[in-house]
Image (cartoon, rainbow, N blue to C red):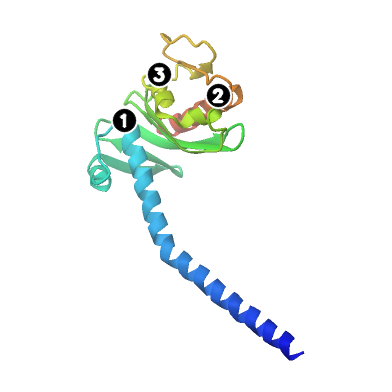
Amino acid sequence: MKDQIKMIIFVFILGIVAASILVGSDTYTKPIIEEYQEYAFKKTILTSFEIEHTQENVLDIYSENIKAEEIDDITFYYSEAGNVGFEFEGKGLWGPIEGFMTLESDYVTIQGVQITYNEETPGLGGIIAEQWYLDKYKGKKFTPEILIKKDADMASDSEVDAITGATGTSDAFELILNQTYVERKGVLD
C-alpha cells in the first residue's frame, strides 16, 4: 500500500514538472513564433509585389513600401506603384491552399502569386507552391477569369498550364483564384 501511494505521488509530481516545462516552453517560444510568422508574411508580400529585399531588411523595406487598409473585414495591401495585394484561401484537393496575390493598378493583371500553405501531394499538386510554376501567372489577366487547363494557349492573356498529374489541384486552384478575385474586386470597386 505504501509503495502504491509513493508511486501515485511520484507520478503526480512528475506530471506537474512535465506540465510546467511544456507551459514554460510555450510561453517562451510563442512570441518568437509570432514574430517569425509576421516576418515570413511580410516577406511573402514583398516577393509578390516584386519589391527587392534581403533577409536582413524585410521589415524596413515593408514599412517603407507597403500600406495596409481594411475594407469590409478584408485587408488590402498597396504598393507605392498603386498595385494591390490580398490573401486568398480555399479548399485544394487534399486540404487548404492559402496564399497572397497582387494585381497591377488596373486590378485585372496579376503581378504575382505566392503560396503560403498547402497540403497537396509533394511532387504533384505540391508543385503549386514552386516559384517556377507561380511565375506562369505573372501578367495573366482576369478577363473574365483565369483558366488553368491542360495544353493552355500560352499566348492567351488568361490561360495557364495545369500541373501534369494534378488535375484536381489545378481545378481547385483555378476556383480559389477566380472566386477570391470576384469577391475582392467587388469590394475594391
Residue 83 marker? 1
Between 75 and 154, the one nearer to me in the picture: 154
Identify which amino acid the numbered label 3 is placed on.
Lys
Q: Position of residue 98 (x, y in %)?
A: 49, 38
Q: Closer to the observer: label 1 or label 2?
A: 2
Q: Closer to the observer: label 3 or label 2?
A: 2
Between 126 and 106, the one nearer to me in the picture: 126
Quick one: label 1 or label 3, which is nearer the N terminus? Answer: 1
Q: Residue at x 77, y 89 (%)?
A: 1
Question: Across the whole image, how many numbered discs are drawn on residues?
Answer: 3
Tell me if label 1 and label 2 are in contact, CB under 8 Å: no
Label 2 sits on a secondary structure element that is helix
Tell me if mark 2 has few (under 14), some (14-19) or many (20+) residues whose alpha carbon lies within 10 angstroms of its own: many
Identify which amino acid the numbered label 2 is placed on.
Ser
Q: Which residue is mark 2?
A: 170
The quarter of the picture where residue 166 lies is top right
Q: Position of residue 157 (x, y in %)?
A: 41, 13
The quarter of the picture where residue 124 lies is top right
Outermost residue toward the right in this view: 1
Name the side, left or right, on which 60 lies relative to 41: left
Name the side, left or right, on which 55 lies relative to 189: left
Q: Is residue 57 above or below residue 24?
A: above
Q: Which residue is mark 3?
A: 140
